[in-house]
């Protein structure tokens, strides 16, 4: 059994994660994935702890996944709803966080439409001398660490269900297709996949994949990150294809002629997958715009799609993160 210690109090970004930290998360998530397959899906690991979900931005999958993960670990949960909170009366975000701190919160899971809010709250918790851990559940166009980790877990577990680990990604080609410019998921996945040894190929229209973005993201492993403004070279011999939602709510300019034209050039349909490896698998962080990023027939094909498995993996991975942040020893 591995004894590598977990030292992070906060999980704000994957940019500085090490391979050993990824492997700790994978091993721990695999253990909790086994717990979730039992008749009794609850463990007393975080009994008496309080996990607060501070979601300043709408979410279905991530919020529900974190809430269920906390409950499976026997933690008490508090859920923040901005529409009915004191924010409407002028309270600041930091004051809101300190209110939940005064209620005895041990961990805060934070999502916000502006980049940097989880980091600001983490700094405030440290300034106050607390031991509260902060987990970034998605901040603006910055990052979405838990989504990147659950995608990593989904891929590695597909390659070896019993012992998911980063070394399985050595030499694997992974295509990420879609609205990369606005995607915090893409950023987290680029950090985790390239650090783990995969070759990542990005494909999108030039308006959704500027060259400067790739230059900035490729600083750690420039040899493992490639840019394509056409779909075909990204798909060629790909082991996995991850498509991303077109984020209309973040687009402030007309970056695409039409959804129909986008699907024609960058949508994933069955005939396009012929360029990939025969055992290629598809991922998508959800929600999916059917007929835009993915055709329904490939999305619903269990021989191709890992999308529902991603959702299941999300609970196990978020259990692992809360467990590790809560002081659990690495498994």
Image (cartoon, rainbow, N blue to C red):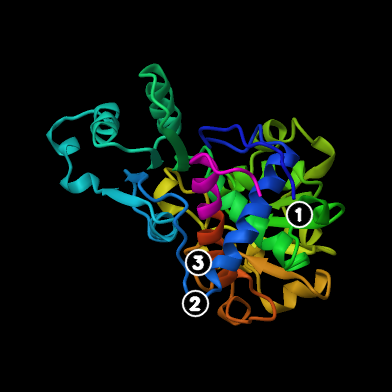
Depth order, front residue of 320/197: 320
Q: Residues within 10 Å of mark 3 (few under 14, many from 20)?
A: some
- In the structure shown, which secondary structural element does the residue marked by tag 3 occupy? loop
Depth order, front residue of 237/164: 164
The reply, left or right, for residue 139 in relation to residue 228 is left
Would you say residue 20 sits in the magenta stretch?
no
Residue drawn 56% across and 79% down? 296
Alpha carbon separation for disc pair 1 and 3? 28 Å
In the image, residue 161 lies at what x, y percent?
A: 73, 68
The reply, left or right, for residue 224 in relation to residue 217 is right
Q: Which mark is residue 39?
A: 2
Q: Can the viewer see residue 125?
A: yes
- In the structure shown, which secondary structural element does the residue marked by tag 2 occupy? loop
In the image, residue 58 lies at what x, y percent?
A: 34, 52
Of marks 2 and 1, which one's residue comes earlier in the chain? 2
Residue drawn 83% across and 70% down? 277
Is 105 rendered above or below residue 274?
above
Q: Which mark is residue 165?
A: 1
| Quadrant of residue 132 within the rendered picture | top left
Q: Which residues are magenta?
A: 318-331
Alpha carbon separation for disc pair 2 and 1? 26 Å
Q: Which residue is mark 3?
A: 288
- In the structure shown, which secondary structural element does the residue marked by tag 1 occupy? loop
């Amino acid at each position: 059994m591995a004894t590598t210690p977990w030292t992070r109090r906060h999980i704000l970004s994957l940019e500085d994660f090490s391979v050993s930290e990824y492997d700790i998360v994978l091993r721990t998530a695999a253990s909790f994935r086994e717990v979730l397959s039992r008749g009794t899906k609850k463990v007393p690991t975080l009994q008496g702890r309080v996990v607060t979900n501070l979601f300043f931005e709408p979410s279905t999958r991530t919020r529900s996944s974190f809430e269920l993960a906390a409950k499976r670990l026997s933690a008490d949960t508090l859920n923040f709803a901005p529409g009915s909170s004191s924010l409407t009366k002028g309270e600041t975000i930091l004051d809101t966080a300190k209110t939940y701190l005064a209620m005895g919160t041990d961990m805060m899971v934070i999502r916000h439409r502006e980049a940097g809010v989880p980091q600001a709250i983490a700094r405030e918790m440290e300034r106050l001398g607390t031991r509260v851990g902060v987990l970034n559940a998605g901040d603006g166009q910055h990052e979405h660490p838990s989504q990147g980790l659950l995608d990593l877990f989904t891929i590695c577990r597909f390659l070896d269900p019993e012992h998911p680990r980063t070394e399985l990604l050595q030499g694997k080609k992974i295509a990420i297709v879609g609205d990369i410019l606005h995607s915090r998921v893409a950023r987290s996945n680029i950090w985790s996949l390239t650090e783990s040894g995969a070759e990542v190929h990005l494909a999108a229209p030039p308006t959704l994949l500027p060259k400067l973005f790739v230059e900035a993201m490729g600083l750690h492993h420039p040899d493992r990150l490639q840019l394509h403004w056409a779909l075909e070279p990204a798909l060629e011999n790909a082991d996995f294809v991850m498509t991303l939602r077109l984020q209309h709510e973040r687009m402030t300019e007309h970056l695409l002629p039409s959804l129909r034209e986008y699907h024609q050039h960058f949508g994933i349909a069955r005939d396009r997958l012929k360029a990939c490896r025969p055992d290629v698998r598809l991922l998508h962080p959800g929600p999916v715009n059917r007929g835009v990023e993915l055709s329904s027939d490939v999305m619903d094909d269990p021989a191709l799609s890992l999308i529902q498995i991603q959702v299941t993996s999300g609970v196990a991975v978020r259990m692992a993160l809360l467990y590790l942040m809560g002081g659990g020893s690495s498994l």
